Image: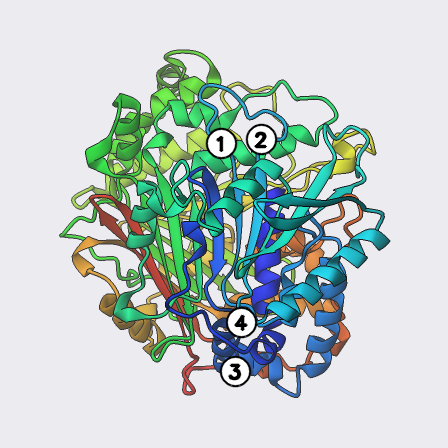
Amino acid sequence: MVLRNIALLYIVTLFAIPSELAYSQAAALGQDVPRSEIFLPADTRAWISIPSTKALGEHLQQSQFGQLTRDPALQPFVATAKERIRAWLETKKLGFEFRLDQFEKINAGEVCIAGILPEMAGQEAIAGSHGVVLMADVGKDLAAAEKLLAEIEEEQERQGAVKLGTVEINGINVGKWEFAKKRKWAKRKRISLQAIVGNWMLVSNNERIFRSVLRRIINLDPQENGNLASQESFQLAMEGSKLPNGSADDVRWFLEPFGWFKLARAIEIENEPVKKMEDNWPAVLARNGMSAVHSVGGTVSVATPDQEALFRIFVSAPKDKVRNEAERRMLDILDFSPDPGKSNTAPAWVPGSVSGSLTGQWNFSKALSSVGPIVDAFMKEEGAFKGLLDTIKEEPDFRVDIPKLIGQLDNQYTLISAVKKPLDEASEKLAVGLKLKPGLTPQQQAEMLESIGRAVRGKEFTLGGIKAIEDDRTNEFDEDDELDFPDDDLVFDEDEDAKFGGGAAPQNQFALFEKKYISIAKDTLFICNDKQYLKRLLTSSDKKPLTGTSDYRRMEDMLKSLSNPENVSSLRFGRIDKVLELNYAMLQKGELANSKSIIGRVANQLLADNGEEGSPEVKLDAKKLPADYKEIAKFLGTVGWVLENETGGWRLTGCVLKKEQSASSP
């Protein structure tokens, strides 16, 4: 919940109100100004930074997205959307009653937020040990920053916060505030310390952390217990995510995964009425090798000379620093090493009309042989995974040899999505294609499909003369069957009121494939959520496959120029206009909540946040949207990325390209 809220703040700040940023900020961050990572402590677990608010705002305005927000046809909707989102942001504070959009009022350089948690070896964080820090470089507009600080203090007082006084810390006058508990069971009251320190506005909800950062800023303890910049995990993540071609950084971020999990868990525990006695799944994953992933970092640049946006993410998992057998197994599971004999280009069976495609490589057999101990850990029984495989193989109703079946796959997969008209809640078509090893006879392929049919208890039928399996469990309730696996459901957070006795609302969950249709053709195992779309994939020979379209070729060429093709193990391509068209239509009809599309479901989870106390649902006025989607689609281009396998981890490099004027409209 905390991660989602912080992410929402950044999304809204960066993309909902770029025009104000562009015109209200006046000075970029100077090269001689130290960056925030110099002042933040070594136990910073999560960090996101905008190096120059002015530059980011200008770049957003130069992009097609900026043109979209200024388009006359969209102005009525943009105006009401900004107004409602601003009202919603009033309920989305950062834990100390600040909002990022308030920095529009000042000429700020870098603005960052960091989550900090001291290392507590072998134990959970104690109450009050963790905190959040906000830093803003206000050196070129100190008078405006002082005025903003005074306005915020007045607002805090109006909302019932109590000023505990002005505390002097190392010669700096610091305002200290206390906020009333939002929930009676909260284990401590929230505080906020805020001051102008040197050229920085500094805010934190933890006094120890505030003092530590303050002392670094005024150079009393520049290396007190190290800093974020000195940490190897940070250095590797940021070096690995450095943008190619010398592109400027508009956004930078860093995450130390298990430190972040501990921080999020500590915040959750402090806000629960009773500490839950539940499995600590991040700790289970850490013990079983996920600790091989040391850090994740990312960088974004907007409106470069060649792209609408350019981004890189680096996952640091050095293979030469594996500490135990569990970490070695985990890296085997996450083995995305490219096979020189395989291509990451979309296969010929992918239609040119799709909205998106992902083709990649993964060593399925290697992953299966290494996953057992992790499954055993979650099932709390040694040998449970092997026993399960043996039972599935020997049980008369199943008789499926999973390792053999996996061994017949060629370690290459393709995922595609398409939108079929008329546009309604079931318009999104999804399919997975798993390439089979060369040389499998028709008899072997038939036996594979038959064994899958037994495993899912599916119904056989024929599509265009090709045998297929229907797996429809939408009306079945077989929770007690020990051999039944959960469907591929994505389960979102329960309503928080229901957690704490405010009602018994059911979990909001959905399946990517509520129904599955499975078949084999073109040396590929297909799994699809729509019978007729599967028939097309099985029987048609597209005159213009995806690889024959100009926008795909353009993206593929761009991604090759941004990466080392020899290290690439997967390639993603998407048409933003096609991806959003369905959700636009559902929003116009007022039926987005009923959408079965992935983006529609995620949008509802992000925007309709009723579960949190005092957090109203964001309702956008769809009546003010242009009736013709083409008014929107003309600004929406293509997105793509490639994943490169490195000795030190994995690098994802991607970009957004402008829409080709000759490309067909949705």
Q: Give the mark, 4 or 3, whose residue is nearer the N terminus.
A: 4
The tag on residue 151 is: none
In the displayed structure, would residue 333 be above or below residue 36? Answer: above
Q: Which residue is mark 2?
A: 129
Which mark lies nearer to you, 2 or 4? 4
Mark 1 packing: few (<14 Cα in 10 Å), some, or many (20+)? Answer: some
Q: Compare residues 550 and 319 and report the one nearer the observer.
A: 319
| Residue 274 falls left or right of residue 281 | right
The quadrant in which residue 633 appears is bottom right
| Residue 603 falls left or right of residue 51 | right
- The answer for how far apart the CA atoms under marks 1 and 4 are is 33 Å
The tag on residue 140 is: 4
- The answer for how far apart the CA atoms under marks 2 and 4 are is 33 Å
Q: Give the mark, 3 or 2, whose residue is nearer the N terminus.
A: 2
**Secondary structure found at label 2:** loop
Question: Type of residue at label 1?
Answer: Pro
Residue at x 67% of width, y 64% of height:
146
Question: Type of residue at label 3?
Answer: Lys
Which mark lies nearer to you, 3 or 2? 2
In the displayed structure, would residue 644 be above or below residue 469? Answer: below
**Secondary structure found at label 4:** loop
Spot occupied by residue 216 in the image (x, y as percentages of width and height): 46, 47
Mark 2 packing: few (<14 Cα in 10 Å), some, or many (20+)? Answer: some
Residue at x 43% of width, y 34% of height:
453
